[in-house]
Amino acid sequence: MSISLHTDKYQLTMMYAHWKNGTHTHRRSFELFFRSLPFGNGYAVFAGLTRALDYLENLHFNEEDLAYLRENCPGFEATFFDYLRQFRFQADVDALAEGTLIFPDEPLLRLDGTIFELHLVETALLNFIGYQTLVATKAARIRHIAPEDTLLEFGSRRAQEQDAAIWGARATYLAGFDATSNMLAGQQFSIPTSGTHAHAWVQDFPCELEAFRAYAHAFPDSSVLLVDTYDTLKSGVPNAIQVGKELKAKGHQLVGIRLDSGDLAFLSKQARTMLDEAGLTETKIIASSDLDEETILNLKQQGAQIDGWGVGTKLITAYDQPALGAVYKMVAKENDSTWEPTIKISSNPAKISTPGRKTIFRIIDRETGKARGDWIASYEQLLKEEEPLTLFHPEHPYKQKVVTNFLAIPLLQPLLRNGKLIAKLPTLLESRQYHQKQLQLFWDEQLRILNPEEYHVDLSKQLWEQKQKMIQDIYKEVHR
Ligand SMILES: Nc1ncnc2c1ncn2[C@@H]1O[C@H](COP(=O)(O)OP(=O)(O)OP(=O)(O)O)[C@@H](O)[C@H]1O
Ligand SMILES: O=P(O)(O)OC[C@H]1O[C@H](OP(=O)(O)OP(=O)(O)O)[C@H](O)[C@@H]1O
Ligand SMILES: O=C(O)c1cccnc1
């Protein structure tokens, strides 16, 4: 299916107007970034690139798309649609790897191409990357407070439609979840899948015990029994124990029980004691019920005896912050084969863009192995690891530090050239492992979920001076 029309109409009106004016082949550079961290977290987790690259590589207008446009864009000349028919995305794209820890104002993708193609793709790129990054970040917060527990993604039924369920499930696996309940996500991305049973299974039998027996008959070595249909401690857990003992007598094992309502701390402690007293020490306790990182942390503080967590609604919908607010801005124009920086001014200083095509280095202290900060420089700027590097706060430049004995890791990698993939992309599993390694570069203080220490993202002196000069020049021009 073509998703080329997954764009805002104003992208098409601008494309048409450029084509009409003969400026559509002018080359420009755009960067995609976000301005503030979601959920009060100290970092975000970059996700959505795989989908974005697939979209860019396959971008074309089929006859159905063209017919629709012809009908719905009445001001457009007919020959424009012939131009669109042969259109293919031919820009160059550099991007960070999925799973990278990312920070505000860092270019996550840089695209160099014609203004025509770069307008077209803005909406879809922001849509894919904004959502997946948000869900991956939420998942990372949950993984952070439950490092050893089993984490299951249960959100499909509450996700904002199918794509969000599928790609959201992928984002949670990238950021450390163990499995998803969504089989299509499992099939599409080779994510491990997991499933217990619903209340309806129990309701379908004359009594709970029969329901549990029948389920255990079907899955003698992999049953997780949902124990809260009637009464967790008076009925569910005793019946699960009965079935657990029967399984044990036949050489099998009750893998787990699932608590889905009530006071999860109290119920889990009681259930653990009851299971242990019955000799079912191996049987795990899984909890679900509107969970998120705050509730899970709180339950842990209460001494809840829970080994695994099924997390749905609040994860897949990024409940407490449903949009990342990513943006896509023009940073340079090509004139006679040289890139001339451009800036967007705003009355809100935080919204003034940083001009020029950029690159990012993650500066790693060779002694501690930890990141000292990210250094954003202009694309052509060289960084010599043998020379001391002065990092300074872009808003408060007097705040400085000099870094020596460091490793500078370039984060943006060339991925598309003339619209074609030139690099081998990592598998999802590799990206997941890379994400875990990324976390090790940061201090616990930067990773905690409440009021984390701010990680430093600084501009090179050259980039900073260029920005100040452009702001001043424009200010003088406007206030002449
Ligand atoms: N000990 C606990 N401390 C803090 N929060 C808890 C504790 N136990 C459960 N919760 C949370 O409290 C909320 C309980 O919600 P609520 O009372 O609406 O539903 P419930 O008990 O799950 O029953 P039902 O699903 O049938 O509506 C859930 O978000 C759950 O995760
Ligand atoms: O609570 P979430 O984090 O969204 O996790 C998914 C929920 O979906 C299922 O029940 P469902 O919500 O359909 O019914 P229930 O509320 O009656 O349990 C499951 O039992 C979980 O409670
Ligand atoms: O497998 C489960 O227990 C499950 C899956 C999706 C939603 N709620 C529960």
Image (cartoon, rainbow, N blue to C red):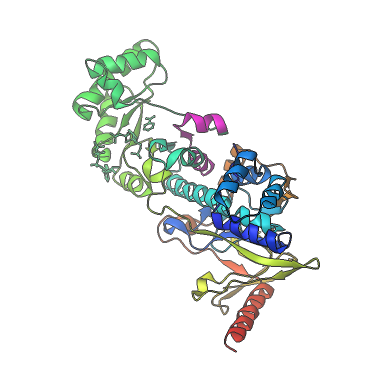
Q: In this rendering, would 244 be left or right of 20?
A: left
Instruction: Give the answer, above or below, for where 45 lies relative to 343.
Output: above
Res 159 visible: yes
Q: Nearer the viewer, residue 326 or 141?
A: 326
Identify the residue at image location x=48%, y=62%: 36
Q: In this rendering, would 273 be left or right of 83?
A: left
Rendered location of residue 35, percent (x, y):
51, 63
Rendered location of residue 317, percent (x, y):
41, 46
Q: Nearer the viewer, residue 302 or 167?
A: 167
Identify the residue at image location x=42%, y=59%: 40
**Among the 4 quarters of the image, the one containing residue 214:** top left
Q: Nearer the viewer, residue 183 or 264?
A: 183
Q: Which residues are magenta?
A: 169-188
**Among the 4 quarters of the image, the one containing residue 275:** top left
Quarter occupied by the N terminus: top right
Rendered location of residue 318, percent (x, y):
42, 49
Res 190 visible: no
- Identify the residue at the far top of this view: 250
Q: Total marks drawn?
A: 0
- Identify the residue at the far right of this view: 336
Quarter occupied by the C terminus: bottom right
